Image (cartoon, grey):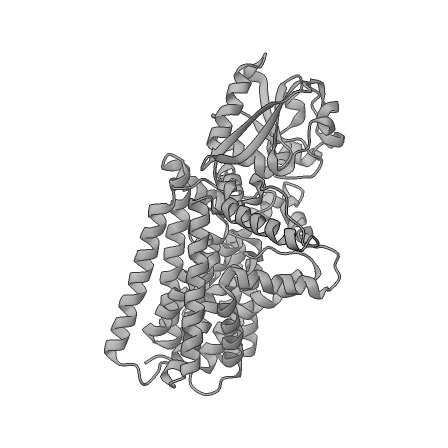
Amino acid sequence: MEEGQSSCSSPETQASARRLFWAVLVGATLLRLLIAGTFGLSADESHYVMYARRLAWGYFDHPPMVGFLGALGELLGGGVWAARLGPVLCWAGALYLLRRLALALYGDERVAAGAVVVLALMPMQQMIGMALLPDATLNLFWCGALLAGWHALRTERWSRWLLAGACIGGALLSKYHAVLLGAGLGIYIVFSGEGRRALKTPKPYAAALVAFLVFAPNVFWNATHGWVSYKFQLAHGGGSGRFELQKLANVIGGQMAAASPVLAVLLVIALVRLLRGRGTGKTADRYVALSCLVVALFFAFFGAVGKILPHWPAVGWWPGALAVAVVTVRALDAGSVRWRRWAWTAGILAALMSAVVYLAAAVPVTGRLYDAARTAAEKINGRFPSIPVPGPFKPEYDLSNDVHGWPESARQVENIMAAMPMPGRTFVFCHRFYATSQLGVHLSPGVVATTLRRRPSQYMLWFEPAEYRGWDALFVDENHDFRGPDQYASLFEKVDSEPVRFETLRGGKPSHIFHVYRCYGFAGRVEGGREPSARLKEQR
């Protein structure tokens, strides 16, 4: 029996929990494989497929692992399903490692099954478990590092220490905030008895060296590219730098939406109980709680002084799921009817929210709901004129439209390009780099897509303006951000004032509206005259 195992858990109960774990893991994996190709790539996924087509040890905003993972899909022939195969397998692998961690910590199959159920039901995990995002490999290496780190502390074996270091390095190559993984493990080592004993040996320092060596190629890449990625991340989400309660409320609200409100509250209660626990399982409890808490506190603080996105702290939910699961198992063993009710409520609500995620991706329901709400508002306004009536629905209001219509848009743009005077010397550009990637990933090989904004992005590393001096271009202005060509007019000898307009349809209604402006005689510079630094030019 391992640390923290419940004495009232029978072999039959353990076997049932083990079967539940494998049923959820296999079922969720098969479901994701079945639906992975049924809707298009998101803006982020498209951008990372572009990474996969230009492999490097670093990119403007991320380390390289997401590009390597996307390259697996390219090797399999490309396409949406192939791009998402790697993330689906990473999610399944991370769940398996989480089970191994639960058994190492508590020796209880119910904890492992409970954790996988929590993650399988969470709305945010529906995206992370399938989308081509840096989180896919981050979760895998994070769980591997926690498992190897625990075994290293308990067994003091060299192989476990070195494996933990390699996993931390892999996590850093996945996402830069994996430094929190090392920080959490470091804090636990310093404040635990076995950790302090380990610090008197060379093993943890060797693990740190291995982590650095694995991560070193990205450091070298940044050193030869003006430290561009590190500078971007240090400034990213900085905001005003002042603590604001409203921003902190936004962070909390984002996590409640990502996990479901009840489940988020249960996590807070579970962490408090684990940190205050005594007796059997104390060291395991603190290992789990600290692994989650370091992530939660870091993003709560930076969200309160700047701006974060809801999925940034998502990796903390992997040990967080263990925290909820072990506290739930103990509460049920103690006969807590109230906790049972809240656990069921959390699970049902999370499942319903996850179902909405899939429904919105598959069926254009947002427009219908908006129109129904607008009709209701008109009726109310008839009796209470002070109640405003929202304007007509626009395609950009439905965020799920972002994963539809881009292949058709690319074909339309190529048809316009074919009618240009120099089709082979015509490039495509959009105002936003995300739109550039969403369009560019579906353009034929050899067609150049970029942005011409002053604001830096990955395209400043891929696109040398001077090399395209004299080329023509198509400015694709899409409905999220209609700008018109005026701000780019000085970059060309001539810009047609009348655009070619087209739209893509979803469910018989527009999903995207495009205005394509034909531009002639590129001047070989970007908006505002910005040129890449000499060091960046040398690396192209």
| Identity of the residue furthest to the bottom in this view | 279
Residue 466: x %, y % from top left: 67, 23
Residue 350: x %, y % from top left: 45, 63
| Identity of the residue furthest to the left in this view | 12
Q: Residue at x 46, y 34 (%)?
A: 508
Residue 492: x %, y % from top left: 71, 20
Number of numbered labels in the structure image? 0
Instruction: Please tell me which residue lies in front, 420 or 297.
Output: 420
In this image, 23 relative to 330: left or right? left
Quarter holding the C terminus? top right
Quarter holding the N terminus? bottom left
Residue 54 in view (yes/no): no
Quarter where residue 243 is shown: bottom right
| Identity of the residue furthest to the front in this view | 383
Q: Residue at x 53, y 83 (%)?
A: 276
Above or below — where is 398 with respect to 247?
A: above
Residue 382: x %, y % from top left: 64, 51
Instruction: Please tell me which residue lies in front, 455 or 361.
Output: 361
Above or below — where is 354 with respect to 67?
A: below
Residue 99 in view (yes/no): yes
Quarter where residue 96 is shown: bottom left
Above or below — where is 338 with respect to 379?
A: below
Above or below — where is 415 with respect to 312?
A: above
